[in-house]
Image (cartoon, rainbow, N blue to C red):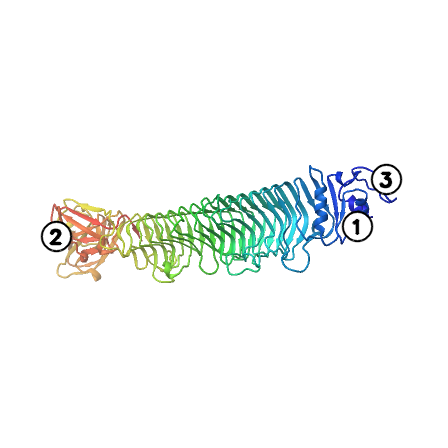
Amino acid sequence: MADETFRNILPPTKAVDNLDGTFSVGVSVISGLGSLGATCWVVANDAKAEVKAFAQKLQASGYPAWVCDGVNDQAQIQAAIDALPAGGGQVLLLEGTYVFAAIVTPTSNVTISGQGMSTKIEAPAGGDYAFATMFLISGVNDVHITDMSFDCLKRVSYAVQILNSARIYIENIDVDDTWDDGMSIEGGSTYVTVSNSVFHDCQNPAITPGTAAGIEIEDGATDVLITGCNSYNNQAGVSIQTHNLEDGCQRISIVDCWLHDNTYDVPAGPMATQLRITETTPATAMYDIRISGCILTGGKYGIALNSDRGSGFIICENVISDSSVYAIDATGDSTGLRICNNNIKDAIDIHITMPDVVVESNYLMNTGILYGGADCNRVSIISNVLRQDSGIKYILAQAATRTRILDNNLYDCAIWVISGDSPTITGNYVYGGYVDAGHGYSSIYVDSCDFTTVALNTVEYPDTTGIRVDTSDYVLIEGNQVLQTQSNNGAGRGIRAHNCNYVSILGNIVSNTVDANQQYGIVGSGTNTEVISGNVISGSSVSALSGVNADTYSNQRSDLFMDVLAASANYIVDAQNLVNGAVALTGTQPKYPRGLDCTITNVAGAVSAYTMTVVGVNAKGKTITEVFTFADDGLVFSSDNAFDNITSVTLADVADTGNATFVMGIDTRLGLMNDIQETTDVWKIIKNGTKETVAGAQVDVAKDIYDMSVITLAATDDFEIWYRSNLNIIS
């Protein structure tokens, strides 16, 4: 059934008489080798004896069939190629092993097809390096090589080398054990497609150690598509590079490939990379390189990109894992890199020194984002998810100016920005975020960055500090939520500005409702010229606002007290009987919030008990209640609060046999609209146009009151009281 071997390759084109009484398949009738048809057959030396004999009869009769000798099989294959008509055609390699001792050079419009992995191209056994490549596609067009395997036995540099050629298609090949790259596409080649192929065990042990790749694309190759390929156990899976003064590669797509475990025979150096893109002083720029839908696993680097003159790099929708140095390493001065929609796990960091980079919508597990450097400007980190279950991970910007960190979700990770001006950190959610002491154990940490904006972030359960800004000028911290601050490595602080100038902390919510670990709400240690306004602070176990300097809060606001009333013993209640029930408020309500004085006139020592309840509102319009008793307050007492209005005075439990009376008036204490957290919060007092000395001893921090007894207070005096903090809500 030798004829069935040929019947299964191509359908018959014409029925002819049998040559030996047994042949019945139809083939083209040919008169001499020089006029063969557009399809030729090549039979391996190790094919079945009857197949070889049958092919030899065909060849002897002028039919397009060659039988190899197992030593220089490239000669028969080259002869079949050369015998095709000027318009090209197809060379079919049947099952078996073909030993190449030299190079085969396809011509234009030729397809060389095997029968799958049962068709093997093999280097001669034994010895050292033999020759450069098995197939050299040079200066031709429209060549297709498909359905065969290559075993190069470390004696051949490349299985396939493509130079200055166009419309080349390589499909369904398996390349093993080359001396250098498994396949090389270079020298101005264009419109090259490599699909559904496997490249493995390619190394370069002697020539430039460590740079061999499964597929190499270099020096001016353009419009190349690598799709559906598997490259493993090489020194690099795929390499795109431009050598010194050569043209840059352009419009290269690596799509849906599996690049893994490319760590073979790697010396000390930068290889062990699944995908490598690099250039050395190219004559023209490298641009429009797209890596999409690939799986990259193991080695030092998932993707290593080094380019100074390129643009338009896209790394998207890949899965990268188990890189020991960086998942993605993007260095150089090229612009326009986008890293988006990748899933990266256990791969150290994405590392960037390039400008104008967008890192967006990636999922990172035990993998951080690290970027910065002299040229690393205008980097945007947007809508990524970072998680970690061991160690420390982060978004870390170092010396990166005008960076934007927006709308990211971080779980047990942190955001650090160090030594780069004009950062914007907005809309992020950070849960936990254990970090080291060098970054203040902070979930969001900014150091030495002028013109910083930290806004609209939510931080939950920070380790020790939710948001911290150090040694930075012109800082805006606005609209953030810092919740449930912990104190694992020092005093728990919601927001801290340390050694900064010109800082505004506005409209933030700082709250701990679960424990007492938030010792301080907002801390301004060593910070000058600061505005703290409109914040809501609750659950601070030590102080809501703390650590401010004497010249903090540049936009101070003030209370005005015009034409105040003199202190009076009976302004509110005048000579009422000390009897149970509601007391008639016979006097006048205070013009401004004032402390209350009360005197009970005890007739013959007959008063032995009473309970007096005073209800009113304070300077902030909040309802307040104070209760006085004979046992605690005696016959002459003052209120703790300053009342702007007295709603009711009620007596109960009165024990008096001598018809006692009492009066209630106002004293020299003024109630303040501001929340006073420290005595220095009262910054300046102007009395009747003259600046007075502020005494800390006269400031009641608990009740927001200033006692004018030292400055003195008389009828018609005017006071203006200035504050360092304003409009914060403390609870």
Nearer mark to the viewer, of 2 and 3: 3
First-in-chain label (3 vs 1):
3
Tag 2 residue: 712
First-in-chain label (2 vs 3):
3
Seen from the viewer's position, the closer of residues 269 and 700 is: 269
Numbered mark located on residue 52 in the image: 1
Q: Residues within 10 Å of mark 3 (few under 14, many from 20)?
A: few
Seen from the viewer's position, the closer of residues 459 and 19 is: 19
Residue 85, quarter of the rendered image: top right
Give the amino acid type for the residue marked by disc 2 in the picture: Thr
Residue 444 is situated, as x and y percent measured from the top left of the image, at 38, 54
Give the amino acid type for the residue marked by disc 1 in the picture: Lys
| Label 2 with label 3: CB-CB less than 8 Å | no
Tag 3 residue: 17
Left or right side of 365 for 52: right
For label 3, the SS is loop
Residue 565 is situated, as x and y percent measured from the top left of the image, at 14, 47
Give the amino acid type for the residue marked by disc 3 in the picture: Asp
Residue 221 is situated, as x and y percent measured from the top left of the image, at 55, 44
How far apart are the two marked residues, 2 and 3, measured between alpha carbons?
Answer: 133 Å
Residue 133 is situated, as x and y percent measured from the top left of the image, at 63, 51
